[in-house]
């Protein structure tokens, strides 16, 4: 398969998901254990200001940066909805364009998600 076609087929995503600080590590582990994210980075201290049920709310949260692949997004969303304490959790996927990720990391990520046989490097 030509590299460009393979990159489009296995398009990487970084998914943002905020959660209570006390739940961040547990949720990250579930995501990695179920192989819907190859890596989850936890930014332990963010502040969110948002509308909820007619009120303006302010909360201290953690932000999960989940590294995944396009074809896994639906399953990742299902896992987050099943394990997240919020009734409406944030699941926002940002595409990583072809060529905007080093090939060794890309290959490792796809291998961990079960998308290719072996990682480069």
Image (cartoon, rainbow, N blue to C red):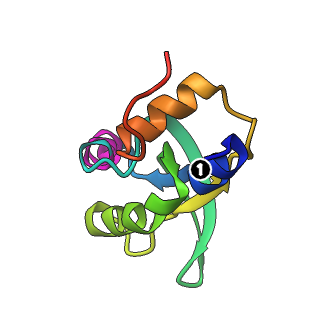
In depth, the one of 110 and 93 nearer the eye is 110
Vertical comparison of 21 with 106: above or below: below
Q: Residue at 31% x, 47% y: name it.
A: 35
Vertical comparison of 10 with 109: above or below: below
Across and down, in percent, residue 60 comes to 50, 47
Residue 116 lies in the magenta stretch? no
Residue 26 lies in the magenta stretch? yes
Which residue is disc 1 drawn over?
Answer: 13
In this rendering, does residue 59 appear at all? no
- The tally of labels here is 1
Q: Which residues are magenta?
A: 22-31
Vertical comparison of 59 with 74: above or below: above
In this rendering, does residue 67 appear at all? yes
Residue sitting farthest toward the bottom:
54
Across and down, in percent, residue 24 comes to 35, 44
Magenta-drawn stretch, dominant element (helix, strand or loop): helix
Across and down, in percent, residue 16 comes to 56, 52
Q: Please rate how many residues cluster around mark 1, counting C-alpha atoms within 10 Å: few if below 14, some from 14 to 19, many from 20.
A: many
In depth, the one of 2 and 113 nearer the eye is 2
Across and down, in percent, residue 96 comes to 69, 46
Q: Residue at 38% x, 75% y: name it.
A: 87
Q: Residue at 51% x, 51% y: name it.
A: 69
Taking the image as shown, residue 93 lies to the left or right of residue 42, namely right
Q: Secondary structure at mark 1?
A: strand
Quadrant of res 32: top left
Taking the image as shown, residue 117 lies to the left or right of residue 44, namely left
Q: Residue at 51% x, 36% y: name it.
A: 45
């Amino acid at each position: 398969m030509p590299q460009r076609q393979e990159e489009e087929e296995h398009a990487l995503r970084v998914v943002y998901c905020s959660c209570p600080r006390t739940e961040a590590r547990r949720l990250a582990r579930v995501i990695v254990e179920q192989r819907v994210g190859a890596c989850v980075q936890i930014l332990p201290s963010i502040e969110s200001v948002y509308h909820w049920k007619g009120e303006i709310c302010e909360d201290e949260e953690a932000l999960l940066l989940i590294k995944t692949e396009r074809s896994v997004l639906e399953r990742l969303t299902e896992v987050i909805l099943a394990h997240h304490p919020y009734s409406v959790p944030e699941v926002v996927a940002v595409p990583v364009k072809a060529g905007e990720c080093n090939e060794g990391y890309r290959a490792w990520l796809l291998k961990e998600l079960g998308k290719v046989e072996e990682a480069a490097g």
